[in-house]
Image (cartoon, rainbow, N blue to C red):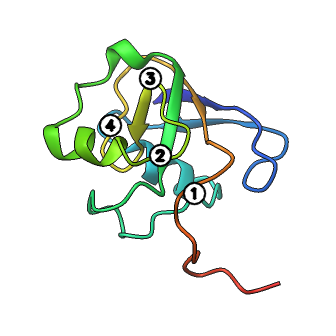
């Protein structure tokens, strides 16, 4: 199992978290499996940017993004050089530090009630 440190996010993970995931698991699935409800409006089909994350440590150990992911990342809010779509980035055997950006470009969150 690989350790993933999730930096604090005001809504999804206020205290931050340390989770574990099997190599080959997407970062998105690892977060969801550990009750960190990251948005994934396209149901993890690489068709949106709502699961955008920034890899603060361990980025270089991930397989490079494919062209479709790169094209979508250009539309992500808060894009950084170490940005990835968490549904496409697969955990390796190297620990990661992941930051979930404060905002997404998704205006209507699926599965969330209006407040």
First-in-chain label (1 vs 3): 1
Instruction: For marks 4 and 1, give the one nearer the viewer.
Output: 1
Q: Is residue 56 above or below residue 24?
A: above
Give the secondary structure at mark 1: loop
Quarter of image, res 73? top left
**Relative horizontal placement of residue 35, taking residue 75 as reference (left or right):** right
Q: Separation of disc 3 and disc 2 at Cα?
A: 11 Å
Q: Is residue 87 above or below residue 59?
A: below
Q: Which residue is mark 2?
A: 52
Circle 2: is it few (<14), some (14-19), or many (20+) Cα within 10 Å? many
Instruction: For marks 1 and 3, give the one nearer the viewer.
Output: 3
State if disc 3 and disc 1 touch (CB < 8 Å).
no
Q: Is residue 96 above or below residue 100?
A: above
Instruction: For marks 4 and 2, give the one nearer the viewer.
Output: 2
Q: Separation of disc 1 and disc 2 at Cα?
A: 9 Å
State if disc 2 and disc 1 touch (CB < 8 Å).
no
Q: Which residue is mark 4?
A: 90
Residue at 72 percent of width and 54 percent of height: 12
Residue at 64 percent of width and 54 percent of height: 36
Q: Which residue is mark 3?
A: 82
Where's residue 57, x and y in %? 53, 15
First-in-chain label (1 vs 2): 1
Q: Separation of disc 4 and disc 1 at Cα?
A: 16 Å
Q: Separation of disc 1 and disc 3 at Cα?
A: 18 Å
Q: Is residue 41 above or below residue 44?
A: below
Mark identifier at residue 38: 1
Residue at 57 percent of width and 31 percent of height: 98
């Amino acid at each position: 199992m690989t350790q993933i440190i999730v930096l604090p996010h005001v809504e999804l993970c206020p205290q931050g978290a340390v989770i574990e995931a099997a190599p080959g698991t997407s970062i998105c699935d690892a977060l969801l499996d550990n009750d960190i409800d990251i948005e994934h409006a396209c149901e993890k089909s690489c068709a949106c940017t709502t699961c955008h994350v920034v890899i603060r440590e361990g980025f270089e150990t991930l397989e490079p993004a494919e062209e479709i992911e790169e094209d979508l990342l250009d539309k992500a809010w808060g894009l950084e050089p170490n940005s990835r779509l968490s549904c496409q980035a697969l955990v390796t055997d190297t620990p990661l530090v992941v930051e979930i950006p404060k905002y997404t470009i998704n205006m209507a969150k699926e599965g969330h009630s209006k407040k």
